[in-house]
Structures are given as structure tokens and as C-alpha cells.
Image (tube, rainbow, N blue to C red):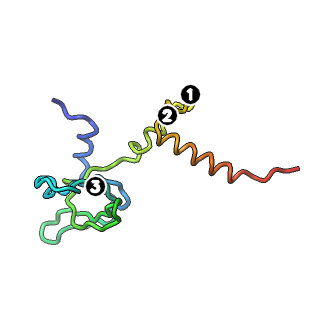
């Protein structure tokens, strides 16, 4: 079975930048069947092991806001902004039925409309 282009691109990336959102899998917990082995994190720092020169990363686990240090990029996958925003980018805004949009699209539109209505300029007489 051929590799999916998106999965292949994720494997090819070996460096990450501060602020990147990533999916991380704690391989030891994963193979031992322990809970909490996979989480969403934000890259806080990149550095290299002195002995090997291998790149490693410090992450912030977003769900518990805890620091996880010394992460190998082999067990990280980039979560591209385009993927997070895809449902909004393809939202059927011309549809009269809001049910055709995903919940994230509807939430974004509601928030945007609420912010826009609170920042309208004062009416001139």
C-alpha cells in the first residue's frame, strides 16, 4: 500500500521551530499499553545532545500545561495550521443552512460576528 503524501511529508520533517504545534507519542508508554501515551504539544525549545549532536525538543503538553523535555523528533508529527483551519476554509458560507457547516466553523463565525459587532464605529448623525 503506498504511503499517503501527508504522512510521508510528516516523516520527512526532522526539525521543528519554537511555537510549532505537534502530536507527540511517548513510545515507552505506547508499547507498554499505558494511558496518556499520545498528546498535543507546543515546541518550546530545540537543542542538541552534547554527546551525539542529535536534535531534541522540549514541549509543553497543552492539556496539562506541563513541560516534557528531551523529546526525539522521531516521535513527533507537525500539526499544520492549514489542517486546523481547513473546516473554516472550506465552510459553505453561501449555504442558507448552518447545519451544513462543521461546529468549529459555526463557532468561529459566531465569535467573529460578536467581535465585529462590538467594534463597529459609532453611528454619526
Q: Name the residue at 58% across, 44% down.
A: 110
Q: Are marks 2 and 1 in contact (CB under 8 Å)?
A: yes
* Relative to 85, 48 lies left or right: left
Q: Earlier in the sequence, mark 2 or mark 1?
A: 1
What distance separates the C-alpha of mark 3 from that of mark 1?
A: 35 Å
Q: Residues within 10 Å of mark 3 (few under 14, many from 20)?
A: some
* Relative to 116, 56 lies left or right: left
Query: Circle 3 sits in a helix, a strand or a loop, which is it?
Result: strand
- Name the residue tied to disc 1: 95
What distance separates the C-alpha of mark 2 from that of mark 1?
A: 9 Å
- Name the residue tied to disc 3: 39
- Name the residue tied to disc 2: 101
Spot occupied by residue 108 in the image (x, y as percentages of width and height):
53, 45
Query: Circle 1 sits in a helix, a strand or a loop, which is it?
Result: loop
Q: Quadrant of the N terminus?
A: top left
Residue 68 placement: quadrant: bottom left
Q: Earlier in the sequence, mark 3 or mark 1?
A: 3
Residue 95 placement: quadrant: top right
Q: Residues within 10 Å of mark 2 (few under 14, many from 20)?
A: some
* Relative to 3, 113 lies left or right: right
Q: Name the residue at 19% across, 57% down.
A: 26
89 or 97: nearer the eye? 97
Query: Circle 2 sits in a helix, a strand or a loop, which is it?
Result: loop
Toward the right, the furthest residue is 125
Spot occupied by residue 58 in the image (x, y as percentages of width and height):
27, 65
What distance separates the C-alpha of mark 2 from that of mark 3?
A: 27 Å
Task: State the mark number for residue 40.
Answer: none
Amino acid at each position: 500500500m503506498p504511503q499517503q503524501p501527508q504522512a510521508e511529508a510528516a516523516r520527512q520533517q526532522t526539525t521543528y521551530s519554537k511555537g510549532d504545534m505537534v502530536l507527540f507519542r511517548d513510545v515507552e508508554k505506547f508499547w507498554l499499553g499505558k494511558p496518556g501515551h499520545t498528546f498535543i504539544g507546543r515546541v518550546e525549545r530545540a537543542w542538541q545532545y552534547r554527546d551525539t549532536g542529535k536534535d531534541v525538543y522540549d514541549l509543553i503538553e497543552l492539556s496539562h500545561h506541563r513541560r516534557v523535555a528531551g523529546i526525539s523528533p522521531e516521535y513527533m508529527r507537525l500539526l499544520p495550521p492549514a489542517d486546523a483551519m481547513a473546516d473554516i476554509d472550506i465552510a459553505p458560507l453561501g449555504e442558507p443552512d448552518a447545519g451544513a457547516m462543521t461546529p468549529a466553523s459555526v463557532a468561529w463565525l459566531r465569535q467573529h460576528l460578536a467581535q465585529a459587532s462590538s467594534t463597529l464605529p459609532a453611528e454619526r448623525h
